[in-house]
């Protein structure tokens, strides 16, 4: 599976944060100050809605909670409007503001499929960073809240 995404947690009541301008976390959204990766997920019986991942189950499987409930969803490189039940997606943005669908995510890198972006090709990996700190041909940002 590679290195999983960091889980938001506290140590002695103090939130452990990722390094500045690097990655967000998954896990407890109730932790004040945590920066959570925001997926668009299609929970069975619902529709495509945004929500955080509670945990990472595999390289492409995440337990995600949306307004429709909680379910293990498979990361799929499609537009949010094309999701089917049991799927989730992430959209990455490059330094030019162009977008990519994410086919795989780890603690530091995403594998991309271009939507309208040209900095990266299908299957290419990029570092994921905080919005506004993207570097051309090196990194992309993903939705955090």
Image (spheres, helix red, strand yellow):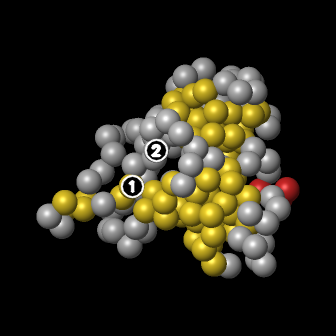
Q: Residue furthest right?
A: 82
In percent of width and height, residue 127 lies at: 51, 30
Horizontal arrangement in the rendering, residue 97 relative to residue 127 (left or right): right
Q: Residues within 10 Å of mark 1 (few under 14, many from 20)?
A: many
What residue is rendered at 45% in x and 38% in y? 3
* Element at label 2: loop
The number of discs equals 2
What residue is rendered at 43% in x and 53% in y? 25
Q: Foreground residue, 61 or 16?
A: 61
What residue is rendered at 69% in x and 40% in y? 103
Horizontal arrangement in the rendering, residue 56 relative to residue 32 (left or right): right
Horizontal arrangement in the rendering, residue 137 relative to residue 22 (left or right): right
Question: Which residue in the protein does label 2 denote?
Answer: 4
Residue 95 visible in the snapshot: no
| Residue 128 vertical position relative to residue 54 in the rendered view, above or below | above
Calculate the distance from the C-alpha at mark 1 to the C-alpha at mark 2: 9 Å
In percent of width and height, residue 136 lies at: 58, 22
Q: Residues within 10 Å of mark 2 (few under 14, many from 20)?
A: some
* Element at label 1: strand
Residue 57 visible in the snapshot: yes
Residue 39 has which mark? none
| Residue 118 vertical position relative to residue 18 in the rendered view, above or below | above
Quarter location, residue 23: top left
| Residue 61 vertical position relative to residue 10 in the rendered view, above or below | above
Q: Foreground residue, 70 or 124?
A: 70
Q: Are marks 1 and 2 in contact (CB under 8 Å)?
A: yes
In percent of width and height, residue 89 lies at: 69, 52
In percent of width and height, residue 92 lies at: 64, 41
| Residue 119 vertical position relative to residue 99 in the rendered view, above or below | above
Question: Which residue in the protein does label 1 denote?
Answer: 7
What residue is rendered at 75% in x and 27% in y? 122
């Amino acid at each position: 599976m590679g290195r999983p995404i960091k889980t938001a947690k506290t140590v002695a009541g103090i939130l452990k944060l990722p390094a500045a301008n690097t990655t967000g976390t998954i896990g407890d959204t109730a932790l004040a100050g945590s920066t959570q990766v925001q997926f668009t997920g299609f929970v069975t019986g619902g529709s495509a809605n945004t929500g955080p991942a509670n945990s990472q189950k595999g390289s492409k499987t995440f337990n995600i909670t949306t307004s429709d409930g909680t379910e293990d969803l498979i990361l799929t490189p499609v537009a949010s409007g094309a999701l089917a039940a049991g799927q989730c997606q992430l959209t990455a943005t490059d330094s030019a503001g162009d977008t990519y669908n994410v086919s795989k995510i780890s603690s530091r890198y995403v594998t991309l499929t271009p939507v309208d972006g040209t900095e990266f090709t299908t299957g290419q990996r990029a570092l994921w960073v905080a919005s506004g700190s993207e570097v051309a041909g090196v990194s992309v940002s993903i939705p955090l809240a």
